[in-house]
């Protein structure tokens, strides 16, 4: 696992295969599941993660969210969140195959 | 009874469903946490019973599913369970000794959406491993470890530590590294069930623990982030109890092979409580309404020193089963706590364990097998009748 230290901006990103992302009615929140654990991702965190699906790049996610929530400068917040997610190993550049 | 009211306020969902799908196991580990009288319990739940349990617990909000045992892979329907539970939205964890994990099966698990595999290891040296598990399994487990990597699962290794293997910690860690382990849990034996029977043999000395932690810390520094190592000290060396199961009936739901629903792996032993069977009741009733699950929710059941203790929300008085096993009363404070009037029951045992010679044995070490289980069940009956 020699991941590059920088979150790639222009290639599709995906969830690392150890993780599972879903809406959890009992928590009334999006959650990220991993071995023996769960993180709640309420509000904007869930909206961002929902778009990490192996087809969109960071740049695409930003512009999509800016279209969905017009008039707000979201770039810095979105990128910051995705960098944290990348640092935690939740997401990675889409793998071949 | 303030039970129902106060419990209801804090009642959340069971987040963890642990399915002990069988008590069958090809190993004979001396620290096994299955009940010593496991041979006395009724037939295993059928596949459709398990799928119903998974569905009902999921509806209540359970997100993590542990498929364990015994050795779960002794059943041939684990593939169905994995696929169905994963479809329901669970994160599925398989807890296995690795025996029975063929390439065909792991491929089916991957396909079905299995999240992770936890592989247990008794020791790094084959001789001791075979002695402790009483079978020749070491080579097989090494093969399984390779399969796990090949199918791109994180390599999660559980090693149960105790007096007889803790001095091998360096070799254990090197073996883990050689296998490409990413997470290693070095969990000291806790004294329940078979481990309780064998406590005199298994409790390490303070010096052994100190050395093991030192070796572990050095190893951690050396390997850095490539391997996460957790070292779990035995309760007996703590002076405050653990928050057992994150609080009784708050998070964890265990369903045993025969369908008994329990708030922890061990609660079956507690006297005076009736636990519901999933054959007779649905999970919602079991979790919310059953007297067994409500018995030690909240703090209404507590006695002194817990009742007025500022830490009572922090640890809920520790483990009910440990309190019962050591003091005979499950509503006492867990005697691990140095505020417990029964704390001596723990410190006396710990003092005996400091003797560097082989422990003064009351009996030879007892392997977990059907014969010993029947013998121990018989003994329990005799004790109960004598009372």
Image (cartoon, helix red, strand yellow):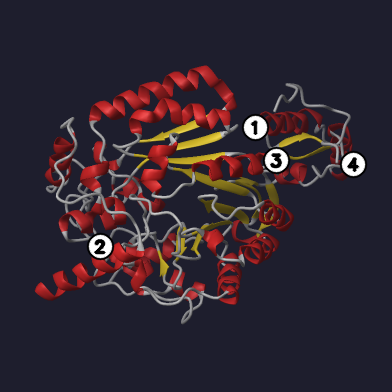
- B127 w.r.t. B306: above or below: above
Say which chain tag 2 marks.
B
Query: Where is residue B368 shown, x and y percent of the image?
Result: 34, 57
Query: Where is residue B204 shown, x and y percent of the image?
Result: 26, 35
Say which chain tag 1 marks.
A
As helix, strand or loop, the secondary structure at mark 2 comes to loop
Give the residue pinned by disc 3. B150
For label 1, count other residues whose C-alpha is less than 10 Å away and answer few (under 14), some (14-19) or many (20+). few
Give the residue pinned by disc 4. A67
Select label 2 or label 1 by which is in front: 1
As helix, strand or loop, the secondary structure at mark 3 comes to helix
Q: Do labels 3 and 2 share a chain?
A: yes
Q: Are marks 1 and 3 on the same chain?
A: no
- Do the residues under discs 2 and 1 have CB atoms within 8 angstroms? no
As helix, strand or loop, the secondary structure at mark 4 comes to helix
Select label 3 or label 2 by which is in front: 3
Left or right for A12, reference A4: right
As helix, strand or loop, the secondary structure at mark 1 comes to loop
Give the residue pinned by disc 2. B301
Say which chain tag 4 marks.
A
- Do the residues under discs 3 and 2 have CB atoms within 8 angstroms? no
- Cα gap from disc 3 to disc 4, whole angstroms: 42 Å
- Cα gap from disc 3 to disc 2, whole angstroms: 50 Å
Q: Where residue A88 is drawn, which disc sits there? A: 1
- Cα gap from disc 2 to disc 1, whole angstroms: 41 Å
Say which chain tag 3 marks.
B
């Amino acid at each position: 696992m020699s991941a590059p230290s920088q979150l790639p901006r222009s290639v599709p990103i995906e969830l690392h295969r150890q993780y599972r992302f879903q809406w959890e009615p009992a928590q009334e929140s999006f959650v990220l599941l991993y071995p023996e654990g769960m993180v709640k991702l309420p509000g904007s965190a869930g909206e961002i993660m929902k778009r990490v699906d192996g087809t969109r790049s960071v740049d695409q996610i930003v512009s999509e969210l800016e279209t969905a929530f017009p008039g707000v400068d979201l770039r810095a917040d979105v990128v910051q969140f995705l960098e944290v997610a990348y640092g935690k190993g939740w997401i990675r550049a889409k793998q071949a195959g | 009874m303030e039970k129902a009211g106060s419990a209801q306020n804090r009642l959340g969902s069971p987040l963890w469903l642990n399915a002990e799908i069988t008590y069958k196991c090809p190993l004979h580990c001396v620290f096994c946490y299955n009940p010593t009288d496991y041979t006395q319990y009724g037939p295993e739940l059928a596949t459709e019973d398990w799928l119903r349990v998974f569905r009902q617990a999921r509806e209540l909000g359970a997100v993590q599913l542990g498929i364990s045992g015994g050795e779960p892979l002794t059943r041939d329907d684990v593939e169905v369970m994995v696929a169905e539970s994963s479809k329901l939205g669970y994160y599925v964890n398989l807890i296995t000794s690795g025996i029975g994990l063929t390439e065909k099966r792991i491929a089916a698990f991957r396909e079905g959406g299995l999240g992770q595999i936890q592989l247990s290891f008794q020791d790094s040296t084959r001789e001791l491993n075979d002695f402790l598990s009483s079978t020749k399994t070491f080579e097989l487990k090494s093969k399984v470890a390779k399969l796990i990597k090949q199918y791109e699962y994180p390599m999660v290794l559980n090693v149960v530590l105790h007096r007889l293997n803790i001095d091998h910690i360096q070799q254990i860690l090197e073996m883990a590294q050689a296998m490409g382990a990413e997470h290693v849990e070095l969990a000291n034996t806790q004294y329940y069930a078979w481990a309780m029977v064998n406590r005199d043999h298994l409790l390490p000395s303070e010096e052994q623990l100190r050395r093991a932690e030192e070796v572990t810390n050095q190893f951690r520094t050396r390997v850095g982030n490539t391997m996460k190592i957790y070292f779990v000290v035995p309760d007996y060396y703590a002076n405050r109890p653990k928050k057992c199961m994150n609080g009784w009936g708050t998070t964890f739901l265990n369903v045993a092979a025969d369908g008994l629903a329990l708030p922890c792996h061990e609660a079956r032993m507690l006297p005076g409580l009736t636990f519901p069977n999933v054959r007779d009741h649905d999970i919602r009733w079991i979790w919310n309404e059953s007297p067994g699950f409500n018995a030690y929710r909240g703090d209404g059941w507590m006695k002194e020193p817990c009742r007025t203790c500022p830490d009572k929300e922090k640890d809920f008085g520790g483990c009910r089963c440990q309190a019962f096993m050591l003091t005979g009363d499950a509503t006492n404070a867990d005697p691990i706590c140095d505020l417990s009037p029964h704390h001596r029951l723990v410190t006396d045992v710990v003092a005996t364990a400091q003797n560097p010679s082989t422990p003064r044995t009351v009996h030879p070490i007892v392997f977990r097998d059907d014969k010993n289980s029947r013998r121990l069940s018989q003994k329990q009956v005799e004790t109960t009748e004598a009372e």
